[in-house]
Amino acid sequence: TSVEVVQEIGHRFVSIKQPDRARELTVATLDLFAPVLPITHAVMHRVPDHLSPAEAALFLPMSNGVQWMYGYGDLKLGDNVVVQGPGQQGLAAAVTAREAGADKIFVTGLSRDSHRLALAQKLVGAVGIDVETENFRDKVMDLTGGKGVNVVVNVTGGGKGTVAGSVAVASKARCTIVLAAAGNQQLDVDALG
């Protein structure tokens, strides 16, 4: 893992101390080999010395998971939730749901995501659903006793049919659908019934 450490922050530039070992990235990736990088509109936070680089890298996905599931999603104790997309953002949202007291947690993905769906089950006891081989709607409705879910967080980046799928499993009593990274999908509201 390659890590740069900020040496000093000037008015518009940041001086970067690079590790002694060779880097795998090329010069073309934003001139990362330069000792000074121009920074525009950046918000920087000091990382405490006791955090490893790997732990610090979790800051963004975990903070997004909290914001999307708990902040925007208005997750309540005992809610049922769906996370569409089992990447780092989705797994962070699932962890947030578990820590905030969700009842049933469903995480959806594609067949190629089987290892991530298994990780969601291991991390938070989530029900993993392969949307390419399983009927997403039927499984969620069956396991919730027909009630559906109260919060959906979509971080698929535009998976086909995910927005309509969110609506299909929404609880009629209360459901917040957070389209954090749903791509550019069209939803025919008239077809919803």
Image: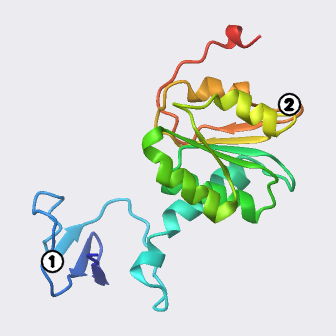
Q: Which quarter of the figure has residue 12?
A: bottom left
| Left or right: 166 in relation to 37 | right
| Left or right: 136 in relation to 13 | right
Disc 1 residue type (three-letter): Pro
Q: Nearer the viewer, residue 69 or 46?
A: 69
User: With respect to residue 36, does 185 lie above or below?
Assistant: above
Residue at the image position 27 percent from the left and 78 percent from the top? 4
Of helix, strand and loop, which one carries label 1?
A: loop
Residue placed under numbered mark 2 in the picture: 146
Disc 2 residue type (three-letter): Gly
Q: Which quarter of the figure has residue 91?
A: bottom right
Residue at the image position 72 percent from the left and 28 percent from the top? 138
Of helix, strand and loop, which one carries label 2?
A: loop
| Left or right: 82 in relation to 52 | right
Q: Is residue 180 visible?
A: yes
| Camera-side mark, 1 or 2 | 2
Q: Which quarter of the figure has residue 34?
A: bottom left
Q: Quadrant of the N terminus?
A: bottom left
Q: Earlier in the sequence, mark 1 or mark 2?
A: 1
Give x and y (percent) for residue 168.
72, 25
* Residue 139, disc: none
